[in-house]
Amino acid sequence: MAITLNGSGTVTGISAGGLPDGIIQSADLASSINLGLVKKVVTGTATGDMTTSITGTGGINSAAYLGVQATITPVDSSSNFLLIFSAGHLICNQASQMGFRLYASENSGTYADIGVKSHTVAYSQSQQTQLSLGCHMLYEPSASSITSLGIRVYGWSSVPGYSTNYYNNGGAVTVTILEVES
């Protein structure tokens, strides 16, 4: 029977086991397809009113640990990691800026800043700005072999001395680590 490909992409004329032996060679098949397999997931969350708030004019380079972290022991020591961060119901006061920095610890080492990942500005001198922030990023470890990865959430603020920004006023601050194939 003849093999036919019609205009809709349907192939006819092939039955189960209908191709001759040896017609498809190994070189004809894709051998390195990587679909980004997720191997493991961990999450760290703080809900309700957080007791930590930042006051003063320290700004973007002075951050305080907010008590939110996640630590993963990877399935594969050569994996990369997708980091997903979200913070709900923030209160930004009095024409100030506030935001978050993520810190990483590879193989139980010291936590190091991996940068500003989300920030906002409130423009009102007399009102609070309530909002949510978030980000996601691919984290590629600097160590050649990873036995653990910890991520901590730090907050920063450029609040004038007469006001306070609140990092969680009834919402949740969450960091999720997904181990993915390299």
Image (tube, helix red, strand yellow):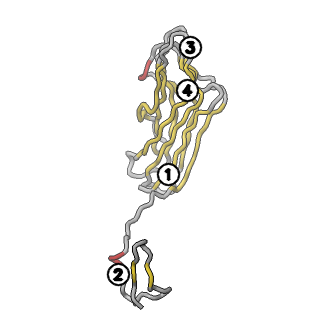
Q: Which element is circle 3 on? A: loop
Disc number placed over residue 74 in the picture, else none: none
Q: Which residue is mark 1?
A: 179
Q: Residue at x 41, y 33 (%)?
A: 115
First in sequence: mark 3 or mark 2? Answer: 2
Is 141 rendered above or below residue 6?
A: above
Q: Which mark is residue 127?
A: 3
* Nearer the observer, 174 or 18: 18
Are the residues tagged 2 and 4 within 8 Å (C-beta)? no
Where's residue 94, x and y in %?
A: 52, 13
- Type of residue at label 1? Glu
Q: Quadrant of the N terminus?
A: bottom left
Residue 135, compared with residue 59, is above or below; it is below
The residue positioned farthest toward the top in the image shown: 162
Q: Position of residue 163 (x, y in %)?
A: 55, 11
**Image position, residue 143 (x, y; %):** 39, 47
The amino acid type, in three-letter code, at marker 2 is: Gln
Task: Give, as a three-letter code, the residue at label 3.
Answer: Gln
Mark 2 residue element: loop
| C-alpha gap between disc 3 and disc 2 | 69 Å
Please say if 179 is above or below 46: below
Front: mark 2 or 4:
4
Which sits earlier in the primary sequence, circle 2 or circle 1?
2
Mark closer to the chain start, 1 or 3: 3
Residue at mark 1 to residue at mark 4: CA–CA distance: 29 Å
| Label 1 Cα crowd, 10 Å radius (few <14 / some 14-19 / many 20+) | many
Residue placed under numbered mark 2 in the picture: 25
Q: Is residue 53 visible?
A: no
Residue topped by disc 4 = 131
The span from disc 2 to disc 4 (Cα, nearest Å) is: 57 Å
- Graded by Cα atoms within 10 Å as few (under 14), some (14 to 19) or many (20 or more), the crowding at tag 3 reads few
Give the alpha-carbon distance from disc 2 to disc 1, as whole Å.
34 Å
